[in-house]
Amino acid sequence: MIKDKQIQIIETVFKNFQKQKNKTDADGITHIIDAGRYTSLERFEREKELIIKSHPIVVGATGQLQSNGDYFLHDLTGTPILIVKGKDGVVRAFLNMCRHRGVRLLEESEGKIKRNIVCPYHAWAYDTTGCLKAVFHEQGFDGVNAETHSLIELDCWVRLGMLFVVPNPELKGKFDIDDWLSEVYSITEDFEFGDLYPYHFTSETLDCNWKLVVDGALEGYHFKIAHANTIGKYFLDNLSLNMENKLHSTIVFPKRALEKMKELPETEWRLRQGANILIHIFPNTVILIEPDHIMVVSFVPIDEKTTQFYSFMLLPTEPQSQKDKDYWDLNAKIFWNAISEDNEMAVLQQKSFNGYSDTEMVVGSYEKLLVQFEILVDEMISP
Ligand code: FES
Ligand SMILES: [Fe+2]
C-alpha cells in the first residue's frame, strides 16, 4: 500500500472519530442472506469443486521448504497434493499418486526426498521435478516414458511468503497468479513480505460451514461485543474501513493507539502501527498484517457443516532465543484467543441453522463485505 494511501486512511479514521460518527461507508442498506446456503450438501459440493479446487488457494508458507528436496503434503481439499522443492530449487506441486496403478507415493506429512520418490508398490521412481526416472522391469511397459508418465503437475506459485496451488490439474495454465492477486498487491506493496519465517502452525476442526468463518472475518462490527474480554479494548469501536475491491477484500481495523499518531507529523504516520490490516484472499484465506508480523489463516471446507481451520505466523526472521520465542508465542496466544471467539460464533450460527435453515440473516451496511463475498460465491457456482 503506497504511503499516500496509508495517510488518507488514517485521515479518514481521524475524521470519523472526531465526528463521533461510525464508519463512512454506513449507507444504511440492509441485506438479506438465506441460511440454507450454510447447510446444503449439494451447494457444498459445488463450492468445493468450483471454488476451492478451481482457484489458487494457500497451501502453506514458502519457508516450509528450506532446501532442495524438502516436501510437505496437503490433503485437506480432498485432492492429494505433494508440494516439493526440486533439485533445481523450483517449488512445484503434484498429485501424490503413482502413474502406474495410483498408489499414494508419500505418506509422511513432511520430509526430505534424498534422490527420487520411489513408489512402495512396484518401485517406479520419480525425481523431485516429477520426472519418471525408472520403471521396474520396463520391458513390460511399451509406450511408458518420462514424457507420458511423469507425475501430474498442478499450478503452484510462491508469492507473499505463501505457497498457492490450484488443486484441479485440469486447470493448469488457466491462472495468471499476479493478475489474480493484483488487488492484494495494491495493499501489500508497502509492507515487507520478503523472506518471512513461518512459525506456530496450528490446526483445528470447526463444526461450521467454511463461509461462516470467512463472513466473521469480514466485519469489525462485532469487535466490541464478541471480543470484549480479549482484543476488543484495543480497537476503536466500529470504525473499520472497507477498501474498494472486486475479488479480495481489505478491511482496516483502527486501534486506539492510532489516536496518538495524531500528535506526530504526517510523514511519521504508519498505518501498520496504528491499525490491523486484514486481507481476505479469495476464496478461503485471511491474512492479518500486524505491526511486526503477519498472521495467515485458511478455512478449508471438509463438508457442509465442517471446516478445517489452519493458521501460521510469518515472522521477519527466525526466532533466535527463548526470549524471541516467548514474545511470538504470546502474540500467537493473543491472536488465538480472539480467533477462538470468532470461531465460536460461527459454530453457534451453524448450530442454529442445522436446527432450522429455513430462515435468513440480516446483514447491515457495516457488514457489506460479507455480502460481496457471498454474492461472489454464488456467481462462481452458478451453472
Ligand atoms: S503403483 Fe506405483 S509402481 Fe506400481
Ligand atoms: Fe473477530
Image: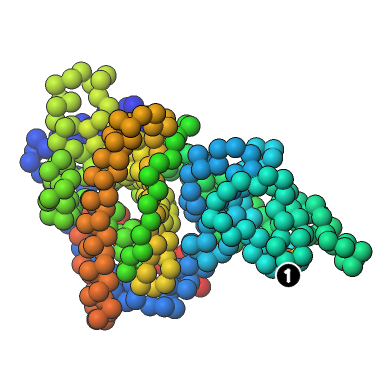
In the drawing, does residue 215 fall left or right of residue 281? left
Which residue matches tag 1?
Answer: 101
Q: Secondary structure at mark 1?
A: loop
In the drawing, does residue 94 fall left or right of residue 255? right
Residue 14: % across, % down: 15, 33
- Is 196 situated above or below 31? above
- Is 251 situated above or below 207? above
- The quadrant where residue 372 appears: bottom left
Residue 246 visible: no
Quadrant, the N terminus: top left
Task: Say what amino acid the circle numbered 1 marks.
Answer: Arg
Q: Is mark 1 within 8 Å of ligand 1?
A: yes
Identified at 14% across, 36% down, the residue is 256
Q: How many marks?
A: 1
- The quadrant where residue 35 appears: bottom left
Residue 287: % across, % down: 37, 45
- Is 31 situated above or below 16? below
Instruction: Identify which residue, 314 or 177, lies in the foreground.
Output: 314
Residue 254: % across, % down: 20, 39
Identified at 16% across, 32% down, the residue is 257
- The quadrant where residue 187 appears: top left
Residue 345 visible: yes
